[in-house]
Image (cartoon, rainbow, N blue to C red):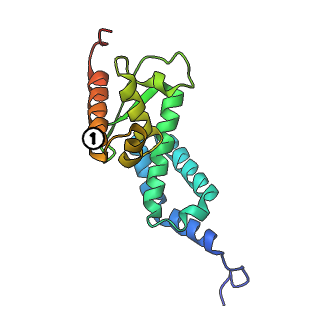
Amino acid sequence: MGIFSNTPKKDKKTKFFDELYETNAKALQKYAYSLLGDQELAKDLVQSAFTELLVKIDKVITHPKPLAWMFKTIYTIYRREAALKHKIVMVPFNEEGIVASLFVREPENKDSLFELMPVGLSEDDQQILLWRFSEDLDNRAIANRLGITESACRQRVSRAVHRCGNLLNSPEPPNL
Protein backbone atom coordinates (compact mmCIF):
# COMPACT_ATOMS: atom_id res chain seq x y z
CA MET A 1 0.00 0.00 0.00
CA GLY A 2 1.50 3.33 -1.12
CA ILE A 3 1.27 6.81 0.34
CA PHE A 4 -1.35 7.84 -2.21
CA SER A 5 -3.53 4.74 -1.95
CA ASN A 6 -6.46 6.83 -0.67
CA THR A 7 -6.13 9.34 -3.53
CA PRO A 8 -9.04 9.06 -6.00
CA LYS A 9 -8.22 7.84 -9.48
CA LYS A 10 -7.68 10.49 -12.12
CA ASP A 11 -10.40 10.88 -14.70
CA LYS A 12 -9.59 10.40 -18.37
CA LYS A 13 -9.22 14.12 -19.14
CA THR A 14 -6.95 14.82 -16.18
CA LYS A 15 -4.78 11.84 -17.03
CA PHE A 16 -4.59 12.92 -20.69
CA PHE A 17 -3.61 16.48 -19.72
CA ASP A 18 -1.03 15.39 -17.14
CA GLU A 19 0.52 12.86 -19.50
CA LEU A 20 0.74 15.37 -22.35
CA TYR A 21 2.30 17.94 -20.02
CA GLU A 22 4.77 15.60 -18.34
CA THR A 23 6.05 14.05 -21.55
CA ASN A 24 6.12 17.12 -23.81
CA ALA A 25 6.40 20.37 -21.81
CA LYS A 26 10.17 20.63 -22.29
CA ALA A 27 9.98 20.06 -26.05
CA LEU A 28 7.16 22.58 -26.35
CA GLN A 29 9.15 25.12 -24.35
CA LYS A 30 12.20 24.61 -26.60
CA TYR A 31 9.99 25.25 -29.62
CA ALA A 32 8.51 28.37 -28.00
CA TYR A 33 12.03 29.56 -27.14
CA SER A 34 13.07 29.09 -30.78
CA LEU A 35 10.24 31.43 -31.76
CA LEU A 36 10.79 34.04 -29.06
CA GLY A 37 14.42 33.85 -27.96
CA ASP A 38 13.41 34.44 -24.32
CA GLN A 39 12.93 31.72 -21.69
CA GLU A 40 10.34 33.55 -19.61
CA LEU A 41 8.22 34.47 -22.63
CA ALA A 42 8.55 30.89 -23.86
CA LYS A 43 7.21 29.59 -20.51
CA ASP A 44 4.28 32.01 -20.75
CA LEU A 45 3.54 30.90 -24.30
CA VAL A 46 3.55 27.21 -23.33
CA GLN A 47 1.32 28.01 -20.36
CA SER A 48 -1.13 29.77 -22.68
CA ALA A 49 -1.16 26.74 -24.96
CA PHE A 50 -1.89 24.40 -22.06
CA THR A 51 -4.64 26.76 -20.91
CA GLU A 52 -6.15 26.54 -24.38
CA LEU A 53 -5.83 22.77 -24.14
CA LEU A 54 -7.91 22.83 -20.95
CA VAL A 55 -10.60 24.84 -22.70
CA LYS A 56 -10.65 22.52 -25.72
CA ILE A 57 -9.77 19.24 -24.03
CA ASP A 58 -12.88 17.43 -25.31
CA LYS A 59 -11.80 18.16 -28.87
CA VAL A 60 -8.08 17.50 -28.38
CA ILE A 61 -8.49 14.24 -26.46
CA THR A 62 -9.92 12.67 -29.64
CA HIS A 63 -7.44 14.41 -31.96
CA PRO A 64 -5.24 11.92 -33.85
CA LYS A 65 -2.09 13.94 -33.06
CA PRO A 66 -2.51 15.93 -29.84
CA LEU A 67 1.17 16.89 -29.71
CA ALA A 68 0.97 18.35 -33.22
CA TRP A 69 -2.13 20.25 -32.06
CA MET A 70 -0.08 21.70 -29.19
CA PHE A 71 2.75 22.81 -31.50
CA LYS A 72 0.27 24.46 -33.85
CA THR A 73 -1.48 26.14 -30.92
CA ILE A 74 1.83 27.56 -29.68
CA TYR A 75 2.61 28.89 -33.14
CA THR A 76 -0.89 30.35 -33.55
CA ILE A 77 -0.74 32.14 -30.19
CA TYR A 78 2.76 33.40 -31.00
CA ARG A 79 1.70 34.74 -34.39
CA ARG A 80 -1.42 36.41 -33.01
CA GLU A 81 0.42 38.03 -30.10
CA ALA A 82 3.34 39.16 -32.25
CA ALA A 83 1.08 40.81 -34.79
CA LEU A 84 -0.96 42.58 -32.12
CA LYS A 85 1.76 43.65 -29.70
CA HIS A 86 4.71 44.40 -31.92
CA LYS A 87 3.03 45.51 -35.13
CA ILE A 88 4.87 42.90 -37.14
CA VAL A 89 3.60 40.56 -39.78
CA MET A 90 4.40 36.87 -39.82
CA VAL A 91 5.00 35.75 -43.37
CA PRO A 92 5.04 31.98 -43.81
CA PHE A 93 7.31 31.30 -46.74
CA ASN A 94 6.29 27.69 -47.17
CA GLU A 95 3.89 25.07 -45.90
CA GLU A 96 6.47 23.56 -43.53
CA GLY A 97 6.14 26.55 -41.24
CA ILE A 98 9.37 28.40 -41.94
CA VAL A 99 8.53 31.91 -40.89
CA ALA A 100 10.23 35.27 -41.09
CA SER A 101 9.02 38.14 -38.98
CA LEU A 102 9.80 41.55 -40.34
CA PHE A 103 8.76 45.00 -39.23
CA VAL A 104 6.29 46.76 -41.49
CA ARG A 105 4.55 50.12 -41.37
CA GLU A 106 2.37 50.85 -38.35
CA PRO A 107 -1.29 50.16 -39.12
CA GLU A 108 -3.70 53.08 -39.17
CA ASN A 109 -6.45 50.88 -37.78
CA LYS A 110 -5.00 48.41 -35.28
CA ASP A 111 -7.95 46.06 -35.71
CA SER A 112 -7.32 45.58 -39.40
CA LEU A 113 -5.07 42.69 -40.36
CA PHE A 114 -5.02 44.05 -43.89
CA GLU A 115 -3.07 47.02 -42.59
CA LEU A 116 -0.31 44.74 -41.32
CA MET A 117 0.46 43.55 -44.83
CA PRO A 118 3.43 45.16 -46.57
CA VAL A 119 2.89 48.25 -48.67
CA GLY A 120 2.50 47.35 -52.33
CA LEU A 121 0.81 43.97 -51.88
CA SER A 122 -2.40 43.80 -53.91
CA GLU A 123 -5.74 43.44 -52.15
CA ASP A 124 -6.25 40.07 -53.84
CA ASP A 125 -2.90 38.80 -52.50
CA GLN A 126 -3.70 40.19 -49.05
CA GLN A 127 -7.07 38.42 -49.00
CA ILE A 128 -5.58 35.11 -50.12
CA LEU A 129 -2.81 35.29 -47.50
CA LEU A 130 -5.24 36.15 -44.74
CA TRP A 131 -7.54 33.28 -45.65
CA ARG A 132 -4.62 30.86 -45.83
CA PHE A 133 -2.56 31.88 -42.83
CA SER A 134 -4.87 33.82 -40.52
CA GLU A 135 -8.07 31.84 -40.98
CA ASP A 136 -6.10 28.61 -41.66
CA LEU A 137 -8.22 27.75 -44.69
CA ASP A 138 -6.88 25.02 -46.93
CA ASN A 139 -6.51 25.39 -50.68
CA ARG A 140 -9.85 23.71 -51.34
CA ALA A 141 -11.75 26.19 -49.15
CA ILE A 142 -9.99 29.17 -50.71
CA ALA A 143 -10.61 27.79 -54.19
CA ASN A 144 -14.32 27.47 -53.37
CA ARG A 145 -14.44 31.09 -52.22
CA LEU A 146 -12.68 32.28 -55.36
CA GLY A 147 -14.56 29.97 -57.72
CA ILE A 148 -11.36 28.46 -59.15
CA THR A 149 -9.77 25.02 -59.17
CA GLU A 150 -7.67 23.81 -56.26
CA SER A 151 -4.60 23.70 -58.50
CA ALA A 152 -5.07 27.32 -59.58
CA CYS A 153 -5.58 28.27 -55.94
CA ARG A 154 -2.32 26.57 -54.94
CA GLN A 155 -0.51 28.65 -57.57
CA ARG A 156 -2.16 31.87 -56.40
CA VAL A 157 -1.24 31.22 -52.77
CA SER A 158 2.33 30.44 -53.77
CA ARG A 159 2.61 33.62 -55.84
CA ALA A 160 1.07 35.73 -53.08
CA VAL A 161 3.54 34.34 -50.51
CA HIS A 162 6.41 34.98 -52.92
CA ARG A 163 5.32 38.57 -53.63
CA CYS A 164 4.79 39.26 -49.94
CA GLY A 165 8.25 37.88 -49.10
CA ASN A 166 9.86 39.98 -51.82
CA LEU A 167 8.14 43.13 -50.58
CA LEU A 168 9.17 42.46 -46.99
CA ASN A 169 12.76 41.70 -47.95
CA SER A 170 13.03 44.75 -50.19
CA PRO A 171 15.31 47.39 -48.67
CA GLU A 172 13.12 50.23 -49.97
CA PRO A 173 9.34 50.59 -50.06
CA PRO A 174 7.74 50.03 -53.49
CA ASN A 175 6.75 52.95 -55.72
CA LEU A 176 2.98 53.20 -55.65
Residue 142 at x, y percent in the picture: 40, 42
Image mark count: 1
Q: Is residue 24 left or right of residue 5?
A: left
Q: Residue at x 52, y 35 (%)?
A: 81
The answer to whether residue 175 is above or below residue 95 is above
Quadrant of the image occupied by residue 137:
top left
| Residue of label 1 | 152
- Report whether residue 15 is seen: yes
The answer to whether residue 63 is above or below residue 113 is below
Q: Amino acid at mark 1?
A: Ala
Mark 1 packing: few (<14 Cα in 10 Å), some, or many (20+)?
Answer: few
The answer to whether residue 65 is above or below residue 96 is below
Q: Residue at x 53, y 28 (%)?
A: 85
Q: Say what secondary structure mark 1 lies in.
A: helix
Residue 94 at x, y percent in the picture: 29, 42
Q: Residue at x 26, y 31 (%)?
A: 162
